[in-house]
Every structure is written in structure tokens, then in C-alpha cells.
Amino acid sequence: MNADPLLTLMIVIPLLGMAVVLSLPSRAHDAIRWTATAFSVPPLLLAVRLLHSFRPDGGFQFVQQVKWIREFNIEYFVGVDGISITMIVLTALLCFICMIASFGIDKGVKGYYALFLLLETGMLGVFCALDFFLFFVFWELMLLPMYFLIGIWGGPRREYAAIKFFLYTLLGSVLMLVTILYLYFASDPHSFDMTRLSQTAHVPMNVQLVLWTALFIGFAIKIPAFPFHTWLPDAHVEAPTAISVILAGVLLKMGTYGILRVNYGILPAATLAPAWHGKSLAFWLLAALGTFNIVYGAVCAMAQADMKKLVAYSSISHMGYVMLGMAAFTPQGINGAVLQMFNHGTVTAMLFLLVGVIYDRAHHREIAGFGGLASIMPVYTGVTGLAFFAAMGLPGLSAFISEALVLLGAWQAYPALTVVGASAVVLTAGYLLWTLQRMFLGKPNEKYLTLPEINFRELCTLVPLGAIVVFLGVYPTPILNLQSPALLRLNDQVVQAAAQAAGTERVADAR
Amino acid sequence: MGTTESLAYFLPELALSVAILAVISVDLALTGRADRRASEWPGIVALAGAGVALVLTLGLRPLVLGLLDDPMQAWLFNRMIVLDAFSVFFKVLLGLALLAVVWMSMSSREIRGQPNEGEYYALLLSSGLAMLLMASAGTLLMAYLSLEFVSLTSYVLTGFLRHNRRSGEAALKYLIYGGVASGAMIFGMSWVFGLTGAMDYAGIARGVAALDPGSRGALFLALVLVLAGFGYKIASVPFHMWAPDVYTGAPIPVTAFLAVGSKAAGFAMLLRFFHFGVGHDGVTAAAAAMPLPQLASVLCVATMTLGNLAALSQTNMKRLLAYSSIAHAGYALLGFVVFADRGVEALLFYLAVYYVMNLGAFWVVMLIANATGREDLEGYRGLAWRGGAAPALALGVFLFSLAGLPPLAGFIGKFNIFAAGVQAKLYALVVIGLVNSVISLYYYARVVKTMFLDLPAADDPAMRFTPSELGAVGVLSLATFVLGVNFNWLLRWVEVAGNVFRG
């Protein structure tokens, strides 16, 4: 194992940036903006280096392991594998883009950027942490900045949205905390090591199922899976543009990442415990909720008059594919799920940024209030078209690949649910095309004839994402190569561990 | 140990006694002097006294750690007072609390410049002295006397603002509740004495072990009565009713002292009595046969739930913190329910952490009251945007720490408590406790919301705070961070202190 401090640097640099930003005079708005943006560059560069020197062999790399609290055997333990690498890259990229996208903030600039940098540390930490205690600390560390970022810089109902987000997430994390503690005391020797807990913790099956459910609820709130999704429309709509991007682009992924890393990785036996038609309860639950999310999110999106709300509900729908793919537990399905996590991150980021662009000009987001924007803002219309088509899953754009993989994988496991999930693509196309038509085509609204075209800074935030969407739509192999060995390994581990657990139980029964 | 030999191990208390006399003398000597500087002297003397006592307590630590091989030597004044790592832990904690509260009083507008300021400091130090005795009481007699000593001084301190009706009302309520609770307690103690024939805790333990099974019911009743007295001191449900009114009416430094010092001393006494007195963790068959853990679990759940639910709707900061402190007594009681394993350690750790964050919160409340004269939540509106960014930030840190969010100290405190609970397989209690923390976040966040998210109204006064005012708050918020990340050393401290009970 190498002791390359790359991940630690990634986690620490934004924190340093926060300290520097805090020491700047609060009136020097431009200095603060540029400093914060500058501090989000090194993590991105490090992420590029990570991509470059990562060997896709399924194991953890760039591992650093230091004793932190001896009494509890808590470690500072970070590392990256094929599951987390795309998420780390996505986080670093979106943070940098969102720093630029936040230049329009002019109230409490210092506080905003300081909190944003703290948030970046928390997010990167969650994806890097391999010690459960550390994971939890980072997980909670994200809550506070998010609460303030929504609550201070958000829209009219920001306070309600902020506290709702806060309470929902905290409820999820206390369930996680109980599980962490249980696993800690069940493991021998007591440890929080996420990579070994599945072997060291000896937990009876019925307890495992309880723990699995507790963890699942915690993560499902984050995804958000129905029925824990109600915080999302509020939080995403009220948050300022850049924060909506982070919420949808990164934070939602933590739910599905957590299920893969923790539910699958630490409690494999419960994940695979057979229940009905040869599938485990866990998979049925994931598949059913996933499919429901797909349809429900799409139907809700269709009913929205507010463009940002529409995008928010479309996130619920798209995250459903991730759950469906994970539930399939076939190589295609799970690969598609993890790829969809990345793709949804880029696509939804574009959508929220685009909503922000129009909101900054027209100061409202009512779809019905626009019309014929294509003739007023042609470039904006072009970029929006690209993002909408990507969200729709048009072939040649990134989301197509991942959704197709998910459906392909799910077909083998849940044919009926897959049919439902696949048909929902029509709904998605429906609400997106309808929106395109209402906003961009038809007679221009007299009020908005003078709306300025999308500017250079805004394009800077959108073009890289668009390029990724197109590139991965045509050539997804590099990213699949990165992640699939790790996913295969996870697959093997889960199956093996579950078989082992079943074996020991049979032995116990025989006695 | 005899009386004369004991004196060498009694230096912190002696120092405090000297300081009390010095404060009274200085106050007398300065009476009638009109200049402002003269009125500062009682405070300075009190601060020095508290500081010396703390230093002397720290000096006792190595001595005690040496004594531990032979626990009998740790009995002072003919077995009246126990000196061991456990009492030293509390003495340090209480010494710190006393020091901080004296410092706090010196900068409080409610206290500063009052005509009877000297009396105030003398009473405050007496209360501190009595708490030190509470932490190390080794017999029923000493326990009762020291507890009454604390109560009596607290009544007067609560009613210190003579021209403030709320202050007077609070003192009266405190007195009446206190009278009932201590009456119940001494009644229970007399039963304990009658049943076991001993006053000192070790003797009681022997008596309990030899008790015939038919008298167990009587003993249980006696213990419940004793618990009433302790429950009153730690503000546990159902003996908590005094707390909201007293916390609201008393001057803020006194409130802080009650919330931090009095509660810690109460817990010290509770732990020691129920361990040495009745062998809670299964030392004796008689104790094991009694439903004490069940009773404690009920108190624990009721205390945290009621405290948190009642706090939700509070609009006065002191009242909100009063209910919050009731809730925190509930979390700490979880450590008492566990008791064996790591329960005591977790409880001690929690009290130390609680000291830092709660004192910090009260300190900020005092700063705001100094600046605006207001204690209601409305007075905090937009605090961060009208010159109060630093105290608002600090209060935010303390409140989120109280809510138990990492990486702050409060999280580690709760983590320890809940870890002990999980280890003892008290899952239901742990889940209830965690759900309670979620509830508590709501009202803590509401305060933060008022300070940061609400914008100040046009007529809200702008404020300025000097670095010297903010010094203590800064130290405490720094400590909240440090204890959240680097708490190895405190874990070791509480382990040494908790070892006393392993025997």
C-alpha cells in the first residue's frame, strides 16, 4: 500500500481555503470569490491525477491509515476504489464549477464561500472515508454548512426548507449511528474498519436485517427514495443555484453510495437473505422503490409549473434507475447504477445551472411565463436542449448508456418492474419536451424580448459538463473500466460472505 | 485518617474557606468607598481564591493516584469524606466551574456594581465549597449536610436581584421545592440508617448485604426517597419543576452555576451513594433484587423526552436552556442506568463536555443580556448581522454541540453515552435517546436560525463586543472543537476516575 497523501490533501485543502477566506476582509467580495475558487482547483487537479494513476484492480488505493482515538480503535482511514473514484471526481468537478456559478451571490459573500468550502471537505471526506466513525463525522459535517447555505442564501421559503432538510437527514444519521455502535461492539476486536467489518462483526441474521433496514432508511432519506423524499422538492427549490447543483449532483449520490458501501459491503448476508422468488427482501425493496421512484418522480415532474421544481422531481425519477440497477445485482445492472450516479450528477447539474441562468434574468421560474425563448436566447436554448435530451436518455448522450445498462441488467431479474421502469422514459420525454415547447418555442413573451444571452461565465460552468455528457455518451469505456473491477469484487464478496453466513447457520441448525 | 492528618488532603476546601473570609473582610473594609475600582475587589479576591483552590486540587491528583493502592487511606476526617480519583475528577470540574462563574459574574451587568456584591461572591464561593464536599461525601450525614449547604446558598444566590420580582419568585419556588425534596431525602436516609445500622457508605453496603429479604421492600422505598433528593439536584423528572423558573429568574451567572456545578455535584453524589451505598452493579444480592435499573431507565426516558418536548416551544433563552439542561440530565442518566461496563465513565465524560458547552452558551446569553438587556429569543433576531457575529457564531457552536453534531464535543459525549448503552444492550433507551437528539436539534437550530437566518428589524440595536468580553467565549468554543477531535486524554481521566467503582 502506498502512503500517498493525495486524498488527505484533497480533504484538507478546502478546509485551508475556508480559513483563508475567513481571514479576508468581508467587503473584499471579488478577492473572496477568487480565493475560494482557487482553493477548489487543487482538489480538481488532484482528482485528475487520481484518475491518471488509479489502477483499476478492484482494491483500495491511496490508502492512509493512522490511529486517531486509541481507546475506541478509531482510525483516520481513507482510500479510494472503483466505486468511490467517480464520485470523488464528480464532487471535485462540481465544487469547482459551483464556485464559479456562485459569483452572482452578493449577500454575505464571505460566509457563503467559507461554508461552501467546508461542505466540499465534508463531501470529499464521505467518499474517501473507510473508517465508519470517520465516515459518520464527515457525513454530519456536511449538514451544518448545507443548513446555512439553504437557510441564509435560499429562496423565500428557505427557513422551512433548511430545517426540513436538516431534521430529515439527522433522523437518518441517528439510525446510522445506532448501527455503527452495534457493529462496533459486535466486531472482534472492536473496530470501525469498514473494509473488514463484514468479516469481523458477528451478527445474527435477524439483527442484521434490523441493522440493514436502519441503514437503508438513513440512506434512502438521502437518495431520496419514496416515501422519504418530501424534503427534496423544498430543499432543492429553495436553495441557491449552486447549492441545488451540489445537493442534486453530489449529496443524493451519497445515499446510493452508502447502500453499496455499507449495506452491501458490511451486511452482505442480510442483503442476499432469500425471501421471495429467489430474490432477497432487500433487493425486492430496492427494486420496487426504485421503479416507484422512476414513475412517481416523472409524474410529479410533469405536474410542476415551476421549472426548478420540475428538475427537482426529475432527480427523484432518475435516482430510481440507480436503485433499480443496484437491486438487479447483475454486472450490467450495478455498473449501470454506478455510472448513472455519475451521469445524473453531470446532467442534473447542467439542468439546475440552466434554471439559475434564466432565473437570474427573469427573476421567476414559471414555465408558463416564458415562450419563444429560442429566438431571444439561441445559445441558451441550444445548451438547454442538450441537457434536456441528455436527461431524456437520448442515445449518444451519457444518461442513455447508464439507463440502458440498468434496464438491461434489471430485465434479467425483474422483468415486470423493468417494463414499468422503461416505459417511464416516455413520461420523462413527455415532461421535458413539453417544457421545451412551452418555454422555447411559440410566440415570444413581450416582456422578455430584451433578455440578455447567456454570458461567458455561465457558459464556462456549462460547457465542461456538456462535453462530459457527450463524451461519455459516445465512449463510456474509460469510466466503466475504472469502476467495474471494484463492482465485480463487491459482487463476489457479497455472494461469498452470504454463502458463508448461510453455511454457518446451517451448521448451527444441524447441531 | 484522623482530623489533623486529613488537613493536608483538604487544601482546596481550606483555600476556599480562606477566600470566603477574605471576600467578606475586603467587602467590609471597602464599604462606603464610593469609587468604582473598590467594588471590583471582592470579585478579584474570589477569582484568586477559586484559582488557588483549583491549582491545589490539581496538586491532589498525583497524591490520590498514589493512594489508590490502599483505598482505606482515602477516607478523611474519620471516614466522613472520601478522597479518591472520582472525587478529584469532580473537584477539578467543580473548581473550573467556580472559576468560570466568578469570572462570568465579574463581567455581568446584573451583578457588577450591586450594593451587596461582596455578599454575592462570598455566597458563590460557599456554594462552590459545598459542592466540593458533595462530591466527596462518604457518609449519609456529610451527604445531607453538604447538599443542604449547596441548596441554602443557591436559594440566596437565586434571589440575589432584590428588586427583580422574578428573581424573588424563583428563589421562593426553589426553596419550597428544595425543602420538600430534602425532607423526602432525609426521611429516606433515616430508613436506610435504620435498616442497615450504618451511616458511612461502606457500612451501608455491608448492611444491605446482610439484610433479610423481607426488608427489601422497605429498603427500596427508602432508596426511592433518597433518589428524590438527588433527582432534585440534577433536575431529573419528576423533580425538575423548579428548574425552568429558577433558571429564568436567577442572575445569569448563577443560572450557569446551577446548570453546570450543581448538576455535576448531584451526579457525583448519586453515583457514589448508589454504588458504595447499595452496590448498584450487582455487588449485593439485595441490591440486585430491586428494580432500581428499571426505575432509573424510566426516569432517564422521562427526563430527556420531557425536557426536549418542553424546550420546543420556549421563547426565553434561559428557559430554553433550562429545559435543555433537563434533557441533558436525561442523557447522562443513561450512563447511570448502564453503570457497570463503561456507564460511569461515559457519564463523567458527558458532564465534562456538558460543562464546556453549556457554560459557553450561558456566557453568550449573558453577553447579549449585557448589551441589550434582553433574554428573549426576539432579542437575538439577526444578531449576526448587527455586530454580534462573534457571539452568534460561538453560540451556534455551543448549541450544535449540545445537539450532538460532530465534530463538536457534544457529539463525542453522546457517542460515549450511547456506546455504553449499546454495549449494555439497552437498545430501546439508545434509540429513544437518539430520537431525542433529533428533536432537540429543532429548538437549538431555531435559535441559530433567529441569529443568522432572520434579518434584524430596523429598531434592533447594533452591538459591539470588545475582545476582552469575548475571550472566555472564544476559549470555550475552542475547547468545544478540541474536545470533539482530540479527547483521548479525557477518556483516560474518566477511566481512572471510574476505576474507583470497580473495586
Image (cartoon, coloured by chain):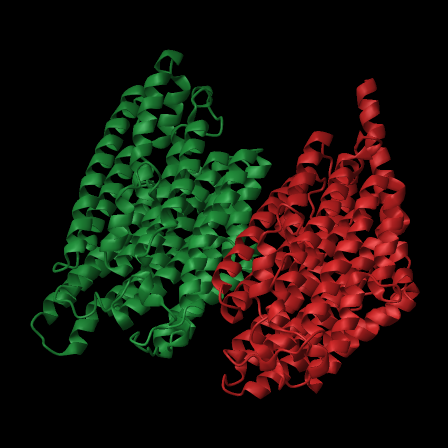
Chain colours: A red, B green
Q: Is residue A246 left or right of residue B6?
A: right
Whether residue A9 is visible to the viewer of this picture, yes or no, is: no
Count of marks, rendered view: 0
Please tell me which residue is depicted at 76% across the width and 36% down the height of the picture. A270
Query: Which is nearer the eye, A182 or A426?
Result: A426
Relative vertical location of residue B99 with respect to residue B192 in this rendering, above or below: below
Relative vertical location of residue B447 with respect to residue A39 in this rendering, above or below: above
Please tell me which residue is depicted at 53% across the width and 52% down the height of the picture. A167
- Please state the horizontal and vertical placement of residue A476, each as a whole percent of the image: 90, 64
Whether residue B377 is visible to the viewer of this picture, yes or no, is: yes
- Please state the horizontal and vertical placement of residue B299, each as a whole percent of the image: 40, 34
Please tell me which residue is depicted at 68% across the width and 85% down the height of the picture. A453
Please tell me which residue is depicted at 87% across the width and 67% down the height of the picture. A472
Of the 4 image quadrants, the one containing the N terminus of chain B is top left
- Please state the horizontal and vertical placement of residue A310, each as a whole percent of the image: 65, 61
Relative vertical location of residue A14 with respect to residue B100 in this rendering, above or below: below
Q: Is residue B490 left or right of residue B165?
A: right
- Please state the horizontal and vertical placement of residue B427, each as a whole percent of the image: 56, 35
Place residue A328 in its image quadrant.
top right
Query: Which is nearer the eye, A345 or A362?
Result: A362
Query: Which is nearer the eye, A290 or B346?
Result: A290
User: Residue most toward the left?
Assistant: B32
